[in-house]
Amino acid sequence: MYLRRVSYFPPFPLLRRSSGSVRGYSTSSPTSKLPLKGLRILDLTRVLAGPYCTQILGDLGAEVIKVEHPTLGDDTRAWGPPYAASKDGGKGESAYFLGVNRNKKSLALSFKHPSGQRILQQLAKTSDILVENYLPGTLKNYSLDYPALREMAPHLIYASITGYGQTGPYKDRAGYDVMVEAEMGLMHITGEPDRPPVKVGVAVTDLTTGLYCSNSILAAVIARAGNGGVGQWIDVALSDCQVATLANIASSALISGEGDAGRFGTAHPSIVPYESFPTSDGNILLGGGNDRLYAILCQRIGRPEWITDPRFVTNEERVKNRKILVAMIAEITRSKTTQEWLEIFDSSRMPYAAVNDIQATLSHSHVLARDMVKTVHHPTCGDIKLVNTPVKYSDSTPGIRTPPPTLGQHTDEVLMDLLGFSSDEVEELRRDGVVA
């Protein structure tokens, strides 16, 4: 009684090749300033990896419909403090949720209800992409798995984000970022040499997984254009992405057949000096990455004689004598403030940087000059600041178009405008607890 029949019409125009064949062309028109304008994404993700992925696509112009539990919403709505207080004095929205959910529409819907399942099936037919991050097999219980939706919507690109993937002995394990950091090697190489392993300060495995997933989705959109408009299933695992981003550390272990070198703190296992050094009021990172840069460092700290010291004349010798050289440099860097050292190294063409906290980062002159912090108006919290999308284009203009939504803010719009429900039908769904 709730559903109207909706046919799928590709959001992109069909372009005719010179041969006369017709295909779907999945890019925005040349005049568009949003590269992904016209793509619709059905977002069944929550927490970080999935929402980060869909936010990237939303920033680029895709329409993102975020499906949330009708009373609780995304888990991260409750992950605070801090919260951006609402204008009426209420608790407002959590900073965590606000950080990864801009440029999205919120549909508050329970797919445990059969009517909710049918609504999502209809939305899948009108969408280009579905992204979900449930345990393998969970959505099969609701006929929302890839095989079921492929029969209804063969064009659909279906991306599944899980801890350990759809196959393998760990596939049924729940996988949060920190567990995968531990299991897949990152934590073992993170921290100080004589201290226990630590996690990275931000959930980097979730974030790299979101990046890999967004990249894979765009590749699948291109592949679909050359495959008669047929979509495919993308299996993205935190564990795989973490192994992939071990990068040169994994390569060294594979080539040498030996164990990794352990934890080095801010230092580099193969380059000296290349780490954080103490100042009188903080820390500064110095990167003497080769013999030329090492010579600049020696000159700037007033020790040119170290350039020709046999113990330090090449990087290989400096690595052998790491403890001696690092201690000698640290003794000198402690004599001045961080700002004084920044001025000394200015224009040296040697890599150097202050070790800033987060507030100093977000108020940094370069960060602000690059337009990385934006003020947007939230419907219940008023003006809030968000980190902007990082990539600049010569022509396209991705960015923050709409603030993170309130729970169920777009339920009526999605049901009525996209699926053709009447206001009475939507209210009946609300009374039955299907939507909010």
Image (cartoon, rainbow, N blue to C red):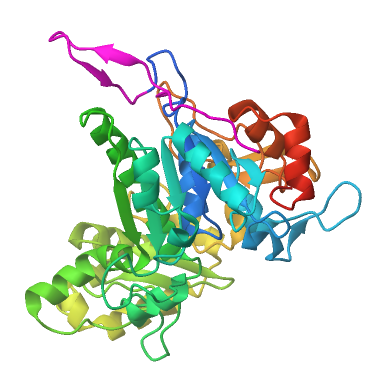
Query: Quick check: 166 left or right of 125?
Result: left
- Residue 11, percent from left and from top: 43, 23
Residue at 55% over, 45% down: 118
- Provide the major secondary structure of the magenta segment: loop
- Residue 289 rendering spot, x and y as whole percentages: 25, 62
Residue 313 shows in this picture? no
Residue 330 to residue 69: above or below: below
Residue closer to the observer: 424 or 337:
424
Question: In this view, which residue lies farthest toward the front?
Answer: 1
- The residue depicted at 27 percent of the width and 68 percent of the height is 167
At 55% from the left edge and 57% from the top edge, which residue is drawn?
A: 46
Q: In the rendered structure, does residue 3 fall within the stretch colored magenta?
A: yes
Q: Position of residue 214 (x, y in %)?
A: 38, 46
Q: Quadrant of residue 196?
A: bottom left
> Residue at the location (75% across, 51% down)?
432
Q: Is residue 117 above or below residue 218?
A: below
Residue 206 against residue 114 in the figure, above or below: below
Residue 216 visible to the viewer: yes
Q: Which residues are magenta?
A: 1-27
Q: Is residue 95 left or right of residue 197?
A: right
Question: Quadrant of residue 293 in the image?
Answer: bottom left
Q: Is residue 24 left or right of residue 72?
A: left
> Residue 179, position in %: x, y?
43, 78
Of 147 and 282, nearer the camera is 147
| Residue 226 higher or lower than 90, as above or below | above
Is-magenta flag for residue 114?
no
